[in-house]
Amino acid sequence: MGCWAIAGPWAEGGTPLGWGPVDDGESIRAVRRALDLGVTLFDTADTYGAGHGERLLGRALAGRRDEAVIATKWGYTFDERTRQATGTDATPAYLRRAVRDSLRRLGTDRIDLYQLHLADLPVPRAQALVGALEDLVADGLVRAYGWSTDRVDRATALGRDAPHAAAVQHTLSVLRDAPDLLAVCDKYDLASINRGPLGMGLLTGKYTPASTLPRDDVRGVTSGWLEWFRGGRPAPEWLRRVEAARAALTADGRTLAQGALGWLWARSDRAVPIPGCRTVAQVEENTAALARGPLEPDHFAEVERQLAALRAAALREVDRPYWPSPMLPTARP
């Protein structure tokens, strides 16, 4: 379960970074229902909600901590009082302070997976953090660590150079494949934690070309790192992919979201999707995909056939304005 959406509002200046107002009570019920239904990994970040996301997850897991694998992230700085993002800090000193702050907010004595959140941090600066991360492992404060990045060279450096590296978190969905990153995970025996497995909601099927997201939702503003929505509306080139794949994803009676999760498990046995959920109903729909498992080979093949032309078209010059630009140092989520 991805826990960005339940963290509540926070912003960078006047730009929202959350998914709008949330009901903390419903969020806690959703986390607990997820546990009941077999979800074990909960992925958050210290910056989500400017600390509120970690505190909320800690409350939800109180009394059931040992049933869960907690993954969180560090690297972005923020002001908890004003709920404002304030910058980045990739120093070992900040790492040591950030992990203790996260432990306090989560109400736990260890973090199962601690992930560097700065996707484009230069490799030498990331390598300078490995010693401090290994110290945290030796002290029992962190069980393993990883990097949230879509950069193949960063993922390679992690797998090659970091003794207790366990995972790369990266974008992967039926809308956007990541063969090079999956190859790195295979080579270095890393988990592939799949960010955006439902395309920030596009693969739930509830959005149309006329849908408009509110201005207090991160999807409702234009951002260089957010590819699925543009000007507060679903990007039409991505909606075309959803429609192209819909029939094959739902052919055996799955919902569209369940089919999208099944595609990931069929794509790689290292895939660990982290779909975001804000309600108990969303949790129940997504976790029902567990019982169905990977897409059948013929359905997977049909999805790939339907999307082949659209994936090729995305490389044409006419489509490049909507193709994601290189991630910036302040790339999110």
Image: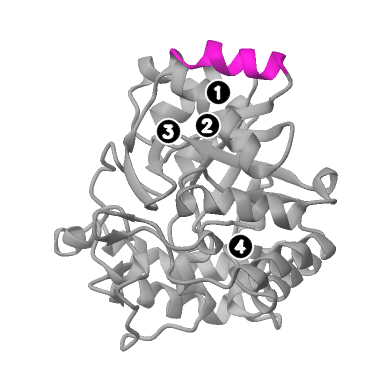
Range of the magenta residues? 128-139
The relative height of residue 139 versus residue 243 in the rendered view (above or below) is above
Q: Quadrant of residue 115?
A: top right
Q: Position of residue 89 (x, y in %)?
A: 36, 28
- Residue 262: percent from left, percent from top: 66, 64
Tag 4 residue:
263
* Residue 55 vs residue 296, the one in the foreground: 55
Q: Which sits earlier in the primary sequence, circle 2 or circle 1?
A: 1
Across and down, in percent, residue 291 comes to: 81, 68
Q: Is residue 203 left or right of residue 142?
A: left
Q: Amino acid at mark 4?
A: Trp
Secondary-structure class at tag 3: loop
State which tag comes first along the sequence, 1 or 4.
Answer: 1
Looking at the rendered structure, the kind of residue marked 3 is Gly
Mark earlier in primary sequence (4, 3) = 3
The residue wearing badge 2 is 184
Q: Residue at x 26, y 67 (%)?
A: 221
- Asked whether, in this view, residue 197 is left or right of residue 226, the answer is right
Residue at x 59% of width, y 37% of height: 102
